[in-house]
Image: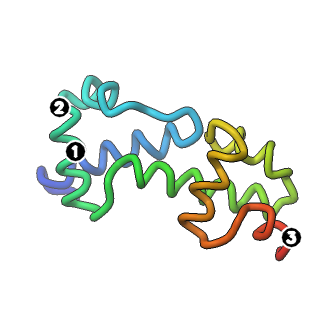
Amino acid sequence: MPTPRTRRPRALRDLLDAHVTDGLSLEEAGRLLGRSPAHLARTFTQTYGIAPHRYLVGRRVDTARRLLLRGTSVSETAVEAGFWDQAHLTRHFRRTVGTTPARFASGR
């Protein structure tokens, strides 16, 4: 059962999960949840140990991994996972996974 202390961070996480590919600004999340963006970011980070933006990027990288394992091209994967372009995907993918999307896909 969520406590009042974890309710808003969980609600923000649910919103981020629902907007993995299209994204959601903290300002919009704040309007939807009735809290300031700074408050949401602070409580999310305290609860989950990761900033909301980093969480969202991680979810996008997870989506990219699944798409690459299915055989989707790197450029298509970038767009479908919510990254601006292939370079944007590659930068975050390498930072998170430790290899490029192309190498990851070729090793499947």
- Foreground of the two, 17 or 40: 40
Residue located at (57% from left, 56% from top): 92
Of the numbered discs in the image, which one, if any, rests on residue 8? Answer: 1
Q: Are marks 2 and 1 in contact (CB under 8 Å)?
A: yes
Q: Does label 1 or label 3 sit earlier along the sequence?
A: 1
Front one among 9 and 1: 9
Measured Cα–Cα span from mark 1 to mark 3: 40 Å
SS under mark 2: loop
Quadrant that contains the C terminus: bottom right
Give the residue pinned by disc 3. 106
Q: Residue furthest left?
A: 4
Real-space Cα separation, disc 3 to disc 2, in angstroms: 44 Å
Q: Earlier in the sequence, mark 3 or mark 2?
A: 2
Residue in the foreground of this view, choosing between 37 and 8? 37
Figure colour scheme: rainbow
Task: Give the SS element for disc 1.
Answer: helix
Quadrant housing residue 49: bottom left
- Mark 2, other Cα within 10 Å: few <14 / some 14–19 / many ≥20: some
- Judge whether 22 appears above or below 41 on screen: above
In this rendering, the label closer to the viewer, 3 or 2:
3
Hey, what amino acid is under mark 3?
Answer: Ser
Residue at 87% from the left image edge and 58% from the top image edge: 71
Q: Secondary structure at mark 3?
A: helix
| 49 lies above or below 72 | below
Q: Quadrant of residue 80?
A: top right
